[in-house]
Amino acid sequence: MLAAMPSTAASLSARERLISTAADLLATGGLRSVTARALADLTGQSASAVNYHFAGREGLLAATFEAAAERVAHMRAAWAASLRAGPPPEAFASWFAAFKIGRAHV
């Protein structure tokens, strides 16, 4: 799924719908579930849409992983910025304490 994606499937481009649907299929069914037929059925596009937009399944998978990495990078940057803005929330403080304790024994 892409960062800052519109909330409705109708507002997504065909390429974005394929990436989003591939991410959903990967999350629920693994790599083997990402097939041209499944993508066509779920997005309402032709089975050849993957080849048209990504030059094949490998290109779609690469774009899907790139989109996920981009989302993680944005989330990480936002989290780091929030930590710089003030003391971490209690949940984060306890996690860091547990991490420090765990690392002390390594």
Image (cartoon, rainbow, N blue to C red):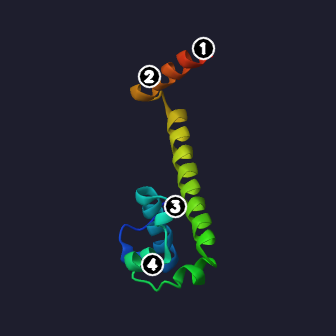
- Label placed on residue 104: 1
Depth check, mark 2 against mark 3: the one in front is 3
- Give percent across and percent down for residue 48: 53, 85
Circle 2 packing at 10 Å, graded few (<14), some (14-19), many (20+), is few
At horizontal 59% and vertical 84% (from top left) the residue drawn is 52
Q: Of the residues under marks 1 and 3, which one precedes in the sequence?
A: 3
Vertical relation: 59 (above or below) 106: below
- Percent of width and height locating residue 32: 50, 64
- Tell me whether the residue at label 4 lies in contact with that at label 3, contact meaning CB atoms closer than 8 angstroms: no
Residue situated furthest top in the rendering: 105
Q: Earlier in the sequence, mark 4 or mark 2?
A: 4
- Are the residues at dot 2 and dot 3 in contact (C-beta closer than 8 Å)? no
The amino acid beneath tag 3 is Leu
* Residue 102 in view in this figure: yes
Q: Nearer the viewer, residue 101 or 42?
A: 42
Q: Report the Cα–Cα distance between label 4 and label 2.
A: 46 Å
Q: CA distance from mark 2 to mark 3?
A: 35 Å
Residue 84, how many percent across, how many down?
A: 55, 34
Looking at the image, is mark 2 or mark 3 earlier in the sequence? Answer: 3
C-alpha distance separating marks 4 and 3: 14 Å
- The residue singled out by tag 4 in the image is 37
Judged from the image, the secondary structure of the residue bearing numbered disc 1 is helix
Query: Dots 1 and 4: beta carbons under 8 Å?
Result: no
> Pointer 3: what residue?
31
Secondary structure, mark 4, is helix
**Taking 45 as reference, is 64 left or right?**
right
Q: Amino acid at mark 1?
A: Ala
Query: Which residue occupies 58% across, 54% down?
Result: 69
Name the residue tied to disc 2.
94
